Amino acid sequence: MIKVKADELVLLLRKASKTQWSALTQKDVKPEEKVPPYNPSEDPSAGIMNMMKKMYDEGDDEMKRTIAKAWTEGRDKSGGGMNF
């Protein structure tokens, strides 16, 4: 069915099969995140650092600024920064 209006065109289509679509295009399909298995011999803070790295890599500019600011303030408070 097609409807033509002054400011839009409405086109209604019926799917050939009644299967459920998770997305309209392949690029909209989000891969399932896999949780790595727990390894007691691994450093506990490594998981947090990996999570922060992933958030930084996938985040927008504001997220990157927030993470960088928190990291810098944490480093300065712990005395890890260079003091001249």
Image (tube, helix red, strand yellow):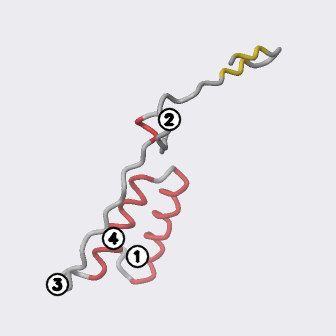
In percent of width and height, residue 23 lies at: 49, 40
- Residue at position x 58%, y 27% from top? 14
Q: Which residue is mark 1?
A: 75
Q: Which residue is mark 2?
A: 24
Give above or below for 56 relative to 47.
above
Camera-side residue of 20 and 83: 20
Task: Report, in whole angstroms, how far the alpha carbon at label 2 lies from the one at label 3.
Answer: 43 Å
In percent of width and height, residue 37 lies at: 24, 74
- Residue at position x 36%, y 62% from top? 53
Query: Mark 1 or mark 4: which comes first in sequence?
Result: 4
Q: Which residue is mark 4?
A: 49
Task: Report, in whole angstroms, how far the alpha carbon at label 4 lies from the one at label 2.
Answer: 34 Å
Task: Please identify the quadrant where the N terminus is shown.
Answer: top right
Q: Which residue is mark 3?
A: 41
Callout in the foreground (4, 3): 3
Q: Amino acid at mark 4?
A: Met
